[in-house]
Amino acid sequence: MRLHATLMSILAAGAAAVLAVAGLTGGRAAPSAAALHADTSPTAIPVDVELVIAVDVSYSMDPEEQALQREGYITGFTSRDFMQALRGGMHGKVAVTYFEWAGPYDQKIVVPWRMIDGPEAADAFANEIARAPYRRASRTSISGALTFAKPLFDASGYRGIRRVVDVSGDGANNSGPFVTIVRDDVVSSGITINGLPIMLKRPNSFTMDIENLDVYYEDCVIGGPGAFVIPIRERDQFKEATRTKLVLEIAGRTPQARVVPVQARAPRVSCTVGEQMWRDRWGN
């Protein structure tokens, strides 16, 4: 399926999907697990989506991949498709924060929570990302990133109809808690996790890249209402894939859970493959 070809139908369904995801009936929102991790303060600003963007800066991400990853988000937020999705929402505004992650205790917020309600705010958000210095760090802990992301919603200053964590990276979890345990905990709080697996390099033991990283993300990382994965296999795919991912997250047209808790079924790949590869190489 061509990514761009789906955008118009997604946008057309966006407003109805917001209602479905919120569970609106008779003008009143039905109780939802999403309320477990939400800013319930009286000053919280209503938005369509609260979006946490978590980007991989581990050493397996080479400088070119890092630049492409960042450029993809900058281009996505300033695209016409993103702006159309934004305007199709109930409130016409979203809240976004952007952080980088590597090891279990290595997470850094690059852009704190910001409200995007039009082109000027989108440009300002993109410029903040662009100005941040690049950095790299050791290990790959998707579980650490998800653990860090979950409480960010508690005091965001916004009250979203939906809450989404957007994880991009080029490898499997190899440190910190098992990713499935943390994934299930985050999803049980009414938060959706989406994935952008970066699959540009041929897997090898030195970089500890794995085959079928997209399947790993589908079975071990993502979850919640409308969760999805968009893999990137070519460098020239970054901008289009990231834009499509952002539009899907803002439009939110699929209110059905995609992932069952890991205890309920066997994944197609080992969800501890990253940890196993690390032990095989380093012995710990």
Image: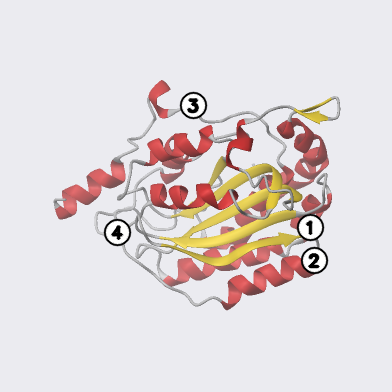
| Number of the label disc, if any, that sits on residue 83 | 1
- Percent x, y of residue 271: 35, 37
Q: Secondary structure at mark 1?
A: helix
| Number of the label disc, if any, that sits on residue 260 | 3
* Residue 264 position (above or below residue 244): above
Residue at 40% across, 42% down: 212
Disc 2 target residue: 119
Q: Amino acid at mark 2?
A: Pro
Whether residue 265 is visible to the viewer of this picture, yes or no, is no
Q: How many angstroms separate mark 1 from mark 4 (CA)? A: 37 Å
Q: Secondary structure at mark 3?
A: loop
Disc 4 target residue: 207
Q: Nearer the viewer, mark 1 or mark 4?
A: 1
Answer left or right for 58 relative to 254. Answer: left
Residue at 73% across, 70% down: 123
- Percent x, y of residue 11: 79, 45
Q: Amino acid at mark 1?
A: Met
- Percent x, y of residue 136: 39, 69
Whether residue 24 is visible to the viewer of this picture, yes or no, is yes
Mark before the other along the chain sequence, 1 or 4: 1
Quadrant position of residue 220: top left
- Percent x, y of residue 164: 60, 45
Q: Are marks 1 and 3 in contact (CB under 8 Å)?
A: no
